Image (cartoon, coloured by chain):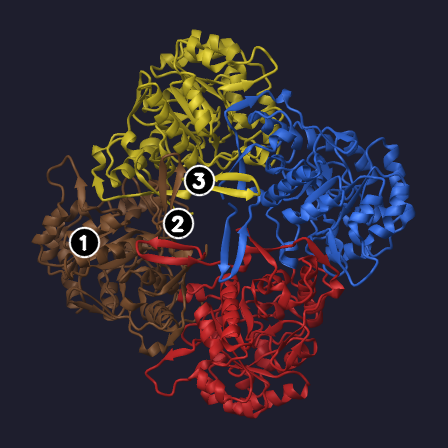
Chain colours: A blue, B yellow, C brown, D red
């Protein structure tokens, strides 16, 4: 059934589709927008909206994590970000928010992130967020998980996010101390979200590590450059649908363990959110869209967590623009612009209503058309 | 036969085509342009050209509705537009025609449409149009149909247009007073045009409500944003052809009831009109193209009826340009520009002649090529 | 074998390909460029290069027709152009060459072509070209063929070109005096080139009229607007290949009558010429590329023969740019620019050599790849 | 299995894919970047990175050839370039590096290359490079191979590169002295790299000439114009995969002779390098990317070896930009820009690690997705 083409003699490729290749098809039923629910729950943590923040310092500070949590979403602190490297990074963030994208923005990011990580600072941030009364999620890379996780967990985190560009359940290393995800998660007291991954098999293997959530995609957007740098480009509609099949198969093989899929890539507008759910995601990870709100830590500038890599940065620095609304308006409207950047989850809700669906899980079955 | 692809394991999408994906293929016969007819008839109302106006205040005032009717088309008044909210909206229209698309145009539209609807004004407009001696059509949204239709019908309307972004025959609501289209239409004395819809099944169900005409599409054009906001994008060639199949099947199941299809989306030029008919439409609903004529109510500016939604606007404000001709020249030429924006129905007529067809119904069978 | 898609239920379209969709694939053999021939022959008239000029006044004056003929190509005079309407149109051409494409260029063209045609002038031009010692070809539209052809033929033309946007062998008219191509050509003493057409069947029927050459395509290029105005867009690779099949079948059904195919559309560079031949054309009709040469009648400006239509113009006015070389350099080089606009037929010759072919007829079999 | 379409009746084309059409799909395994090797070996010559330089004077001088060799790549001198025509071309190179791409840049290149080739100078350059302690490779065109090769070989070259736009093993010529590749290579003492070619059969025939390496592609990039000039456009993913099949079949038919494939076309970034290897290449030939480094001979300007052809140039002159790093930084980083132009082979290495592969040969099997 999958469309497989022969690139050349004996070399095949399967065809993949981007979210921009598909569109939602309303069908014979419609529904009142007020009768629609966008709620979901991850492990013991309920959320009003299927919104997980990408752990970029450009958008996620302890303050904005608390604000997002109170509005019904899930903020994520980067344990390898500036809040873990500097006692008070607010001045630095202001400076980084004002860089010239045509100039040495990437080099300046690299400098800023060269400062060592201080586990004590991570613990302090966790306590601060917890005091805000919201679910606490912290992101760590697979490379630093063994070193940093104990301090993070001890500080009282609710959810640990182990996230790298590409994470597999089977990392090969000449080094004996490499992270074994399965053992690590089995021993851990807190639920883990892990990723990104881009295909059925990796998603399934990550589910088998015992993770509560799996991230699909590598955070691609207009500023990500993993295509140019690594040759890796993720057609998100296909990646999400394949991972959803892994979720189904894993549910069957475990007799009922449901792992949540969080789609992280090419999601900029309320329309993109609706399409990602329609392809099978349980929630979306949002990056740059949150930088457009008032009070964004870097004043509206945007960079990926991989944009500051010391040797091979993979993300362009995106200059700040005027904020287009408060965080609440970003999520819930009212919108005074027609482009899908405001009222992100009101747009999702209305899309669900126009198609006659009443909750996120049901909306995963919406009809899609391929037209590009 | 329909091309169905697997997006990912177990998630399929059928392939859809835009009008811009197809082109008309002339065949072995040609015909004199003077021997071709573009006339059609909806219920008891005959028209020289298959032209229905999109009910936007930017183009449809009582005056332009009368002018369009006298030229052989069908104008439509928006019962929820400015003419139903203000005693004399001409000054307001002039102001709205002069907004800055980069500024707060959408917010200003939202303010203007926050004024309550006054049923008395609707009745007055209907009488004014009727006095002009043309067919009177008024548009109301499904949400307000029960409240507004009685006054509209009492005022002497010829055709009622029930139009929302997406209208289904099966609206689910926790509210007991929701509109039941089938019952409503059965009880009504005047013929109803209803839509938009985007697929075979919804079109068929809408036909079964007893409607005289069904609108296919959601009014998409370069300024519409239902893709960004809702994730809904309608490949019009496919939507029209599917609805034409519903028309055929409904004609068969009723033993002869012919419901007219009005295509509303991505129609900007005479070439687009020809393609929409060639895909199976009986008529086209035209929006922005009518804003280019002299005497357009908002001076040439353009906005969709959904562009002023208070919480989730779905249409960008399009700044006025110099008018390119009178309304008559827009429809019948002569054109002094080669881009298909003038002589819209003369272009259709000549396309029909080049392909050897003599009327609109026959032209629905013209050959099409897919080349994008 | 042809890829046929279902646009919607019951409405199909076959897939067509543009020249820009295909590329030539060199194969296992190469050849010395000096061993390659680009010559062809139409009826009794031999030519060094498969180059027929589009009959636009912007490029074809009696002088340039003679120049092109002496260089081995075939110029064509438009019997309905300015040379047939004005005693001396050189001043007018200079004025038309200097119009503002953003202004009223089309309206000014329409005015210029409103002057009546004077058959005496056509005869005078024919004598002038004949005196230049080259093959004389004159274009007339199907609508004016009966009226103008006698004078043209009497003046001593070698080839009559009956060309309209779309020409069929079966024109339906309420008017009894309509042109019957088959009878007309049978009675005529001079060979006829007829077109444009876009499909197998029309091409075959045109061949059966007794024409010596058939024009495939409607002269499309970046300035043509038959897509916007009529919805007609011709995927030239497909149109040429289909007409080549008609040529083959007609050759078989007549036991040896070979009708030449002249491709008229989307040919701008030497690469396009090579692709058109590779799809099966015997020669190419070139329009705008000839306007780039020194001494072009309108100083480098370009307009199609259909750009001046009084009611429905179908071609944008293209402003003059600096000439890039003499007519000889355009055709034979040497090129001092790398974009395929100079040395048009030297580029064809080298392409043939790189692929190992020795003449135009053989090169029709070159391998093509589809990659867009 | 290969997707073959009917362009028109009886004319088929197989579908080809560009590197930009495909992307690499990480799979279930990852690997430490330090455990990955990018080394390869051609005949007796080992290299740290699969990098062969395109023989353009814009990037390859004796000095830069030595520098590239010391950094683990293979530089190539053009025996028909400026170093073979002028005693000291450095001033001329500086002048050529400063041309105006909108002006007469191509004409100036043509003048510079009109100076005759001096075999003594080639020999001198070869000795100079050899003295640098690196592998010495010299490029000659098929047309000049018989005349120039003896001097080149006598001067002590390690690898002879016989390269033209398109090279076949079966060149047809009316001239009796044409090059017979098979005989020539059989008689030669040094290993030969030959190309470019674009399909399975030509690649196989070139392998049978006894060549040690075969170049796939015609050096296409944003500045190459073989599509516009010749109609030849090479979908590199398909060309590489087809040639890799020829390599496999030739390995089998010879019982073990492995001919290396060098991909030359559309390779601009580290991501492109990874994709070319993933399609089956053993190494990549890099052109314009090397012009971005400090100390590039023409100061950063770029032109193809075919851009100076006296009659039919096929490559646009690309103006110099500021250098983005040293040659070492270009190849090995660290990058301070995120666009894949720096750290070209560090990017390759990391891509291999993300996909769990340990060497270049193994990485040829990486999964690819088609998504454009």
Where in the figure is residue A348, as x and y percent of width and height? 63, 31
Residue that badge 3 annotates: B17
Q: CA distance from mark 1 to mark 3?
A: 34 Å
**Which residue is nearer to you in this view: B283 or A208?**
A208
Q: Disc 3: which chain? A: B
Residue that badge 1 annotates: C207
Q: State the SS at label 1.
A: helix
Q: Disc 1: which chain? A: C
Left or right of residue A174: residue A223: left
Is any part of residue D358 visible from this angle?
yes
Where in the figure is residue B358, as x and y percent of width and height? 24, 33
Looking at the image, do the residues carrying marks 3 and 2 touch, with CB atoms under 8 Å apart? Answer: no
Q: Indicate whether A313 appears above or below C328.
A: above
Q: Are marks 1 and 3 on the same chain?
A: no
Q: State the SS at label 3.
A: loop
Left or right of residue A294: residue C349: left
**Which residue is nearer to you in this view: D163 or C178?**
D163
Residue that badge 2 annotates: C100
Where in the figure is residue A219, as x and y percent of width and height? 68, 47
Classify mark 1: residues with Cα within 10 Å, few (<14), some (14-19) or many (20+): many
Classify mark 2: residues with Cα within 10 Å, few (<14), some (14-19) or many (20+): some
């Amino acid at each position: 059934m999958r469309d497989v083409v022969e690139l050349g003699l004996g070399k095949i490729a399967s065809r993949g589709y981007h979210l921009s290749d598909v569109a939602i098809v309303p069908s014979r039923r419609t529904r009142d927008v007020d009768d629609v629910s966008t709620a979901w729950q991850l492990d013991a943590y309920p959320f009003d909206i299927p919104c997980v923040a990408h752990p970029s310092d450009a958008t996620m500070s302890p303050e904005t994590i608390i604000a997002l949590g109170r509005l019904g979403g899930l903020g994520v602190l980067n344990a390898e970000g500036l809040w873990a490297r500097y006692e008070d990074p607010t001045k630095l963030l202001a400076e980084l928010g004002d860089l010239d994208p045509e100039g040495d923005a990437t080099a300046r990011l690299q400098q800023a992130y060269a400062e060592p990580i201080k586990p004590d600072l991570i613990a302090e941030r966790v306590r601060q967020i917890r005091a805000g009364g919201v679910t606490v999620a912290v992101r760590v890379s697979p490379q630093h998980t063994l070193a940093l996780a104990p301090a993070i967990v001890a500080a009282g985190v609710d959810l640990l996010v182990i996230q790298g560009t590409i994470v597999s359940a089977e990392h090969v290393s000449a080094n004996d101390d490499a992270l074994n995800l399965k053992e690590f998660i089995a021993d851990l007291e807190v639920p883990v979200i892990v990723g990104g991954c881009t295909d059925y098999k990796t998603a399934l293997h990550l589910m088998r590590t015992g993770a509560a959530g799996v991230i699909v995609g590598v955070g691609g957007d207009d500023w990500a450059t993993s295509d140019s740098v690594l040759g890796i480009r993720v057609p998100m509609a296909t990646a999400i649908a394949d991972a959803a099949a892994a979720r189904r198969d894993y549910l069957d093989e475990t007799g009922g363990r449901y792992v949540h899929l969080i789609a992280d890539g090419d999601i900029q507008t309320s329309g993109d959110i609706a399409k990602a759910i329609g392809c099978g995601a349980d929630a979306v990870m949002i990056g740059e869209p949150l930088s457009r709100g008032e009070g964004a830590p870097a004043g509206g500038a945007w960079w990926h967590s991989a944009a500051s890599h010391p040797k091979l940065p993979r993300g362009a620095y995106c200059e700040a623009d005027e904020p287009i609304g408060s965080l609440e308006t970003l999520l819930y409207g009212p919108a005074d612009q027609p482009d899908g950047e405001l009222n992100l989850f009101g747009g999702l809700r209305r899309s669900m209503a126009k198609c006659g669906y009443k909750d996120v899980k049901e909306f995963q079955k919406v009809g899609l058309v391929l037209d590009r």
